[in-house]
Image: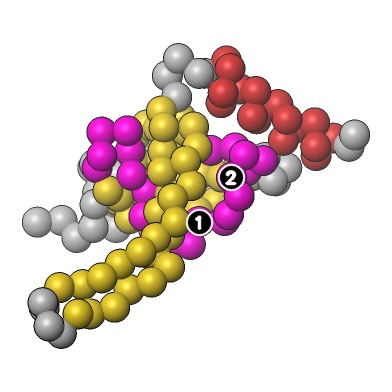
Amino acid sequence: MTMKTDFQALATKLIYEVFGSISQTLTIRRPIYINYDEETGSQIMSSDDYVIQAVIGPWIDKNQAAATSNAIRTDDLSAIISKEKLAITPEMNFDIAITADGTEWAIVQSTMDEAEATLILRLSKGVED
């Protein structure tokens, strides 16, 4: 094993075991088919769901200029997930994240740590009302 794989295994253990009592189920939904049914006037959609454990909390931006701008909403969330356990790399502004309570969030930012052990997703509701 290399140090990188050690960190990846450690991240998975932390999310699933150490922080297991506070981690939540997060579903990454990837649309695979979207079409418009002219007869009914409705949208037909099919998607693949990827379920994973995540540590979810408020989004905190260390960039002071960004933190004080309107670019970050007060209700934005962060989701820390194990890269090792996720079969896909979430696509920003395409895939959606669904929290345990059924709320849908746009994935607007994705950052991977240096060891490629965790993905930190910024989840947002969209444009502020």
The answer to whether 118 appears left or right of 43 in the picture is right
Say which mark, if any, is on residue 86.
2
SS at mark 1 in the image: loop
- Circle 1 residue: 90
Residue 91 on image: x %, y %: 48, 62
Q: Which residue is depicted at the point 80% across and 39% down?
A: 4
Q: Nearer the viewer, residue 41 or 96?
A: 41
SS assignment for the magenta stretch, majority: loop
Q: Which residue is depicted at the point 61% across and 50% down?
A: 87
Which image quarter holds the N terminus? top right
Q: Nearer the viewer, residue 43 or 62?
A: 43
Asked which quadrant contains residue 10, the reply is: top right
Asked which quadrant contains residue 108, the reply is: bottom left
SS at mark 2 in the image: loop
Residue 19 on image: x %, y %: 52, 18
Which image quarter holds the C terminus? bottom left
Answer above or below: position of 7 versus 13: below
Type of amino acid under label 1: Pro
What distance separates the C-alpha of mark 1 from that of mark 2? 9 Å
Tell me which segment is drawn in magenta: 80-103
- How many circles with numbers are drawn on the protein? 2
Q: Is residue 85 magenta?
A: yes
Residue 36 on image: x %, y %: 22, 80
CB under 8 Å between discs 1 and 2: yes
